Every structure is written in C-alpha cells, then in structure tokens.
Amino acid sequence: MNEAVAIHLCMFFLGSLVRYRPDLLDELLGSPAAWLLESFVIYAPLLYLRIVTSLILNVQIINER
C-alpha cells in the first residue's frame, strides 16, 4: 500500500464517521490523541493532491518550506 492509497482510505473512513457516527468522532476529538487526528486532516489533503498531481503530470513535486 502506498501513501496515496492510505490517505484516501483514512479520509474515506473519517468521512464515514462524520456522516454516520458523529458521536464517535466527538469522543475521538475529546481524547488526548486528538492532535494526531487534527493534524492528519489538515495535512493529508494537500499531500494527496500533490501525489496525484505528480502522478498525472509525471513530474516530481518537492515541497520546500
């Protein structure tokens, strides 16, 4: 499994939680590990977009901060 597939599956799972089990998501956001979930939701979409764009254009995209 590569990184793009893992991001897609995790985001799909989180989207399902938001739609079908918002009470469980609220419990997760109230836990001590909520920072991990929040940082994933912030960073993963941009990374996924960069990976997919790189595959479509067949160019390596490097993120410099």
Image (tube, helix red, strand yellow):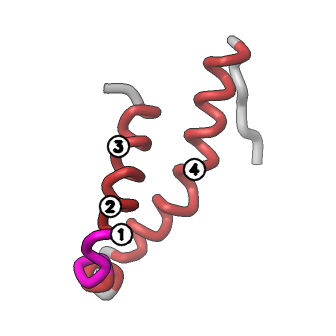
Q: Which residue is identified by label 4? A: 45
Q: Is residue 36 above or below residue 55?
A: below
Q: Is residue 36 above or below residue 23?
A: above
The label on residue 19 is: 1
Q: Type of residue at label 4?
A: Pro
Depth check, front residue: 42 or 24:
24
Give yes or no for contact between labels 2 and 3 (Cβ–Cβ under 8 Å): no
Label 1 is placed on what type of residue?
Answer: Arg
Q: CA distance from mark 2 to mark 3?
A: 11 Å
Region of the chain picked out in magenta, as a range: 19-25
Determine if the magenta segment contains residue 60: no
Q: Position of residue 57 (x, y in %)?
A: 73, 16
> Mark 2 sits on what residue?
16
Residue 31 in view (yes/no): no
Counting from the top left corner in percent of width and height, residue 36 is at 39, 67
Residue depicted at x 63% and y 39%: 49
Q: Distance between the Cα atoms at labels 1 and 2? A: 5 Å
Callout 3 secondary element: helix
Q: Residue at x 26, y 84 (%)?
A: 23
Amino acid type at circle 3 is: Leu
Q: Which residue is mark 3?
A: 9
Say which of 26 and 40 sits in front.
26
Q: Give the spatial CA distance, label 1 vs label 3.
A: 15 Å
Q: Are marks 1 and 2 in contact (CB under 8 Å)?
A: yes
Which residue corresponds to the image point at 46% horizontal and 70% vertical from the top-left? Answer: 38
Q: Are marks 1 and 4 in contact (CB under 8 Å)?
A: no
Seen as rendered, the residue at the extreme top is 58
Disc 1/disc 4 C-alpha distance (Å): 18 Å
Q: Tell me the residue at 72%/27% (across/down).
A: 61
**Foreground label between 4 and 2:** 2
Mark 4 in CB contact with mark 3 (< 8 angstroms): no
- Disc 4 on helix, strand or loop? helix
